[in-house]
Each structure stands twice: as C-alpha cells, then as structure tokens.
Image (spheres, grey):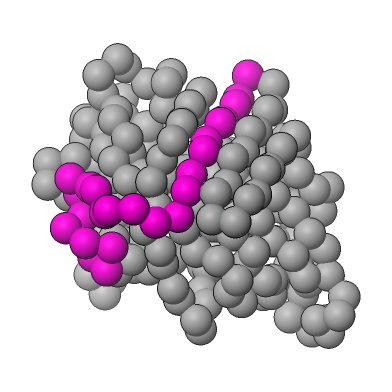
Amino acid sequence: MTIIRDVHAQLRRRLLITYRVDPAVAASLLPEGFRPQVVDGSAVAGVCVLGLESIRPSWLQRRWGLRSENAAHRIAVEWDSPGGVERGVFIFERHSSAWHPVLFGGRLFPGVHRRAQFTIRESGDRYALTMEAGEHSLTADVEVGGAWSSSLFASIDEASDFYRAGRVGWSYAPSRRAVESVALTTGAWSVEGARLNHLRSSFFEALPPGSTAFDSVVVMRDLPLTLSAVGDRRGAELLSPAGT
C-alpha cells in the first residue's frame, strides 16, 4: 500500500487544553520506551482540538481539499534516541468528524482515528464544542484573551515554545503491536492565550481521583499546516505499559 508522506491543510482553529497529571499515573499509561515529560513536578497532558480545511496530499492543488473537526487526547513524552533525548507527545485517542481520517488513518497515513460527532459554536473569540463518540466525550468552552494563568508555564511564550517542541506525535498502529509517528509543522506558528469557561473530558475523568487538574488553554488560528509521516516505527517489544 502506498503511504502518503505529507498532507497539507489550513488550520481554522486549534485549541490546546492542558492538564497537570501525576507523573506516576501518566507513566502507567505509556508504552515501554516512553516516559512523561515533567514540568514543575507534573506530567503535561491535554486535548488538542483541530478544525481543518483544504486537507489534501502535498501534490494536490489547494483549491481541492477536505474539511474535518478532530480531537486528540495526549501526554507530553520523552524518549531516548541515538542522538540523545527527544520530545514529543503520545496520543491515546484520535477522533474525527470526517470519513477520510477514519478510513485512511493508520493505513495510507499514520494515525488511527475513530468517528465522532462534533458540535462547534464559534462566536468571535469564543469557541464552545462538544464531541460524542460512544463512551468517549468532550465538552469545552474557551474564550481567547484575558490574563494568562498557568502553574506550568510562566508566560504564553513559554507555553508556545513547549508546544512547538512537541511536534512529533506517537500513537498505536492499527494492530496495536507497534507505534508510529507523525509530525505537525507550520511556517507561521502563532499562539494566543485564552481562558476556560467549562471543560469535561471522559478520558481525564476516568483517571484516578485527584491525579489530574486543568492548567491552561491556548488557541492557534488561521495557519497553514503540514502533517508528515516521520517514518519512525517501533515494534511490539515496546508495547508493555510501564510498570507492568
């Protein structure tokens, strides 16, 4: 099967909702070979909500393309490579409103997706959304602006640098006997601080009581994106959760 190496898209809106997580709990969720990236005593996890349009292979002209709403639950991780310690994210769940990532993700391009229903209400700088996918659900109400508040990052710029460094995302391959990676890049990186009005995530609520807490949220808007298959894949020997 031919793998699509690069997919281009236009980012309408990206919400990066961040939680502090107990490092031991975070480590217990990860495959062997990955460890949580710890900031000020906490693992850094969260939900990335992406609204994309003009989604197309790199060889297709921009006037063609697809559209989707997507959500990914993830944890910032580190791993050892021949060149030293590298950083990125491990993605546990990807959900999409569209058929193309569900059908082709993990087949023509890395990243298994599951189908979900999204309701998005956008009004100026405010974004209210719900996602429903069987036992998985997410609701969030985010508004751009307001004073910056975070116990993990001293400033929006510090948060921006952290997210930008985590451009490589790992996730399970369809067989779940391997993990594979994809990189997200943009030539016009820009992050805005935001405040949270409401949040519920079935993924984080399922973790042990007291092990998670909301930290902060930032928004990215109106940027070109490229999703690239990194070509790095790890086999079944890495897939025992840490601590088991």
Where residue 113 appears, as percent x and y from the top left, is 68, 44
Q: How many marks?
A: 0
Q: Is residue 124 above or below residue 230?
A: above
Judge by depth and name the residue closer to the eye, 235 or 223: 223
For image coordinates 67% across by 43% down, the residue present is 121
For image coordinates 52% across by 36% down, the residue present is 140
Q: Residue furthest top?
A: 209
Q: Is residue 78 above or below residue 94?
A: below
Residue 165: quadrant of the picture = bottom left
For image coordinates 47% across by 48% down, the residue present is 143
Query: Is 228 on the left-hand or right-hand side of 82?
Result: right
Where residue 158 appears, as percent x and y from the top left, is 23, 65
Query: Is 119 on the left-hand or right-hand side of 144?
Result: right
Judge by depth and name the residue closer to the eye, 178 or 55: 55
Residue 145: quadrant of the picture = bottom left
Q: Is residue 122 above or below residue 239?
A: below
Say which quadrant the C terminus sits in.
Answer: top left
Q: Which residues are magenta?
A: 135-158
Judge by depth and name the residue closer to the eye, 150 or 52: 150
Q: Residue furthest right?
A: 64
Judge by depth and name the residue closer to the eye, 194 or 172: 194
Can residue 86 be seen here?
Answer: no
Asked if the magenta segment contains residue 156, the reply would be: yes
Residue 128: quadrant of the picture = top right
For image coordinates 24% across by 48% down, the residue present is 149
Q: Is residue 198 above or below residue 178?
A: above
Can residue 211 be seen here?
Answer: yes
Where residue 159 appears, as percent x and y from the top left, is 29, 61
Asked if the magenta segment contains residue 102, the reply would be: no
Say which quadrant the N terminus sits in.
Answer: bottom right
